[in-house]
Each structure stands twice: as C-alpha cells, then as structure tokens.
C-alpha cells in the first residue's frame, strides 16, 4: 500500500518536532511529552494560521486525532488538506472548519503548506502547471480570473 505523500510530509514535520524535543533530554514516555509537542506544533500553527486558519485547524485536528488513535479523523484531515470534496460534516465540525479550499484562498493555503514542507526538512515545493491550453475554452471572465490567480503564483511570498 502506498503512503499518501501529504500524510508523509505532515508526519515528517511532526516527527521532527518530537525529535527536537527528545534531543533536549525530554523522555518520549514522559506524560508531559505530548503536551510539549502540542505546544511546539501550536507555535508553528500560529504562523500558518495567519495565512489560512482552516489549514492550521486541519493540521491541529490531524495531530490530536492520531495521538488519540483516531486514524479515521486523521485521514479525513489529510483529505481536507489535499482538497478532497467528500470530507464529511463530522470531521469539519470536529476541526471547526466550514466548506472546502476555494480558489480565493488557494494561494494562502499553498503558502501554509510550503511552510510545513520546509519545516519538515524539504527544500520546498515545485508546482508544475500542465495543460494550460484548457483555459482557452473558458469564458472570458473565467480566463481573466485564472490569469490573475496564475500571476500570483509567480510572486515570491
């Protein structure tokens, strides 16, 4: 079975936080270890939350669910982060989320994701736009919106 790439990145990010805490001498079996890890995660999520609070809420829910052994909720969090449209209301209510990632907040969402990717130890994220000619069949207003959105990806954030 293949591991979802996004889940792997998020897990690597969390493991990195845990490894940093262990390197300071904190025993991973210490009851305070989970609380300290959660505080470290919250410190990172505060920065991410400024760009997209939904992304931060989904990451927080992922960590909390996996810590409790609730892997269904954890998987739903990864699904929501990856843009799946079929994530249920139960997960959204638990995470305090409404709706899905839209084109209006996609760039902020992507910036939050890149921050987590870099925090996980990767160099960054490469985005490849394929089949851009499909946009030619869209109505003029849609093409104009798409062009504006596309130009935003070219700017360093």
Image: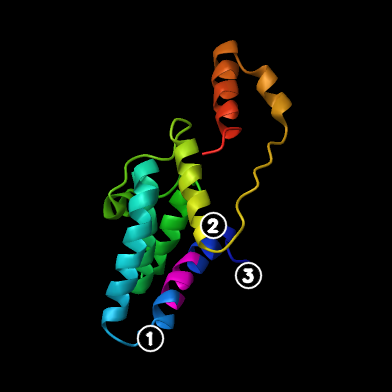
**Do callouts 1 and 2 mark residues in contact (Cβ within 8 Å)?**
no
* 57 lies above or below 154: below
Residue 68 is at least partly visible in this image:
no
Quadrant of the snapshot with the N terminus: bottom right
Label 1, label 3: how far apart the Cα atoms are: 35 Å
In magenta, the rendered stretch is 13-19
Q: Residue furthest front?
A: 24
Q: Residues within 10 Å of mark 3 (few under 14, many from 20)?
A: few
Residue 118, disc: 2
Name the spot of residue 42 as percent of width and height, x first.
32, 60
* 123 lies above or below 22: above
Name the spot of residue 38 as percent of width and height, x first.
31, 68
Q: Which of the marked residues, 3 or 2, is nearer the chain's N terminus?
A: 3
Give the residue number, with chain letter if any, for mark 1: 25
Name the spot of residue 131 as percent of width and height, x first.
73, 32
Examine the structure image and report whether residue 17 is included in the region drawn in magenta: yes
Name the spot of residue 49 as percent of width and height, x first.
35, 47
Q: Secondary structure at mark 3?
A: loop
**Which residue is painted at 34% across and 88% down in the image?**
29
Give the residue number, with chain letter if any, for mark 3: 1
């Amino acid at each position: 079975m293949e591991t979802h790439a996004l889940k792997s990145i998020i897990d690597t990010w969390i493991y990195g936080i845990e490894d940093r805490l262990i390197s300071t001498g904190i025993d991973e079996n210490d009851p305070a270890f989970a609380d300290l890890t959660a505080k470290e995660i919250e410190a990172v999520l505060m920065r991410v939350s400024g760009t997209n609070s939904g992304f931060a809420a989904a990451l927080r829910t992922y960590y909390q669910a996996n810590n409790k052994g609730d892997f269904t909720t954890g998987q739903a969090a990864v699904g929501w982060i990856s843009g799946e449209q079929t994530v249920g209301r139960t997960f959204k209510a638990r995470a305090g989320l409404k709706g899905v990632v839209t084109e209006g907040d996609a760039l902020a969402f992507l910036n939050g994701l890149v921050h987590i990717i870099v925090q996980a130890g990767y160099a960054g994220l490469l985005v490849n736009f394929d089949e851009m000619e499909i946009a030619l069949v869209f109505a003029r207003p849609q093409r104009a919106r798409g062009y504006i959105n596309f130009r935003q990806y070219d700017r360093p954030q």
